[in-house]
Image (cartoon, rainbow, N blue to C red):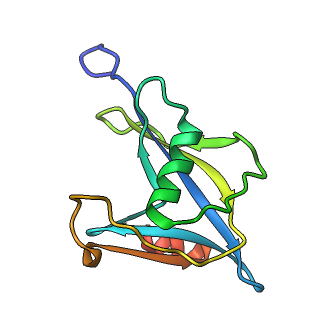
Amino acid sequence: MLNNLPIEKHLSAGLIVVHFDGERYRLLTLRTFNDWDFPKTQVNDGDDPMQAALTVTEELTGLTDLELPWGEEHRETLAFEDGDVSRYYIAQSDTDDVELRVPSGEGGLEDYEYRWVTADEAEDVL
């Protein structure tokens, strides 16, 4: 609360996509310009956060085989000072074949990158 006024929550929703490569689980991370994160998007009023997360992940990566073995279970980050909160669901992919897609009007392919990382590597990247 700032000056005793509640801060409005601004929700983003994303997926932590896991893939078992035969030896270990890896997590899909995306780079937009200089920032690494999991695929996510702002959630508009009335939109289903999980569906928004699935849609943006498919649009950005081409992954269409995503399974949600944990269902709607999710975790949210603590709110930033401006009220921004990120909600993450866990999805599983049988493939690691990503077709990186750049959003229209959002820079060029050189501004985007993806990596499949271990949990330890994710700590360094994120």
Quadrant including the C terminus: bottom left
- Above or below, comparing residue 121 to residue 18 in the picture: below
In this view, the residue farthest toward the top is 4
Q: How many circles with numbers are drawn on the protein?
A: 0
- At x 67% / y 59%, what residue is drawn? 66
In the image, taking residue 82 as reference, residue 25 lies left or right, namely right
- Above or below, comparing residue 97 to residue 5 in the picture: below
User: In the rendering, at what x and y percent does residue 22 appear?
Assistant: 77, 85
Image quarter for residue 64?
bottom right
Along the viewing direction, whichever of 32 and 57 lies nearer the viewer: 57
Image quarter for residue 120?
bottom right
- At x 45% / y 51%, what residue is drawn? 40
- At x 29% / y 75%, what residue is drawn? 109
- Above or below, comparing residue 67 to residue 36 in the picture: above
User: In the rendering, at what x and y percent does residue 6 appear?
Assistant: 34, 17
Along the viewing direction, whichever of 63 and 7 lies nearer the viewer: 63
- At x 72% / y 51%, what residue is drawn? 68
In the image, taking residue 110 as reference, residue 60 lies left or right, namely right
- Above or below, comparing residue 98 to residue 1 in the picture: below
Along the viewing direction, whichever of 85 and 38 lies nearer the viewer: 38
In this view, the residue farthest toward the bottom is 23
User: In the rendering, at what x and y percent does residue 121 appear?
Assistant: 53, 77
Quadrant including the N terminus: top left
Along the viewing direction, whichever of 120 and 88 lies nearer the viewer: 88
In the image, taking residue 1 as reference, residue 97 lies left or right, namely right
User: In the rendering, at what x and y percent does residue 12 appear?
Assistant: 43, 41
